[in-house]
Image: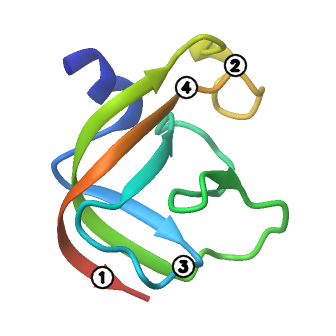
């Protein structure tokens, strides 16, 4: 788990960003490596094509389900397309903000 936290960040207080307003405990969210410079909608599991801000931020405790590190290259993972992805279950929603 330590290696995944280095890649994705603190899963005990993870900030889930989305345009969706209906995240619930036990839902599944998708993560991209924490040093990625592009906006990533964690509920939809996709990068935002436009430079708009994602409206909702949920601070959540997450449980790692699965990772995909097959294309991950740390030196290129900020904006070079060599990203790491993970699927997580929402264990607890600590806070929701707009």
> Which residue matches tag 4?
84
Disc 1 packing (10 Å; few <14; some 14–19; many ≥20): some
Disc 2 packing (10 Å; few <14; some 14–19; many ≥20): few
- Measured in 3D between alpha carbons, the distance from the residue under mark 2 to the one under mark 4, in whole angstroms, is 11 Å
> Closer to the N terminus: mark 4 or mark 1?
4
Camera-side residue of 12 and 30? 30
- Report the residue that reaches farthest toward the front: 26
Label 1: state its secondary structure: strand
Residue 71 in the figure: left or right of residue 98: right
Badge nearest the viewer, 2 or 4:
4
The reply to whether dot 4 and dot 3 touch (C-beta < 8 Å) is no
18 over 89 or under it: above or below: below
- Measured in 3D between alpha carbons, the distance from the residue under mark 2 to the one under mark 1, in whole angstroms, is 31 Å
> Which residue matches tag 2?
76
- Measured in 3D between alpha carbons, the distance from the residue under mark 3 to the one under mark 1, in whole angstroms, is 12 Å
Question: Residue at position x 44%, y 89% from top?
Answer: 98
Disc 3 packing (10 Å; few <14; some 14–19; many ≥20): some
Q: To which quarter of the image does residue 88 belong? A: top left
Label 4: state its secondary structure: loop
73 over 48 or under it: above or below: above
Label 3: state its secondary structure: loop
Badge nearest the viewer, 2 or 1:
1
> Which residue matches tag 3?
20
Q: To which quarter of the image does residue 3 belong? A: top left
The reply to whether dot 3 and dot 1 touch (C-beta < 8 Å) is no
Question: Residue at position x 55%, y 25% from top?
Answer: 84
> Which residue matches tag 1?
96
> Closer to the N terminus: mark 3 or mark 1?
3
> Closer to the N terminus: mark 2 or mark 4?
2
């Amino acid at each position: 788990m330590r290696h995944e936290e280095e890649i994705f960040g603190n899963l005990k207080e993870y900030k889930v960003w989305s345009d969706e307003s209906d995240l619930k405990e036990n839902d599944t969210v998708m993560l991209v490596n924490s040093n990625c410079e592009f906006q990533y909608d964690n509920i939809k599991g996709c990068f935002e094509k436009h430079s708009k801000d994602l409206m909702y931020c949920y601070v959540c405790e997450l449980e790692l389900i699965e990772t995909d590190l097959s294309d991950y290259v740390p030196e290129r993972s900020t904006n070079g397309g060599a990203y790491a992805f993970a699927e997580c279950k929402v264990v607890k929603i600590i806070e929701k903000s707009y």
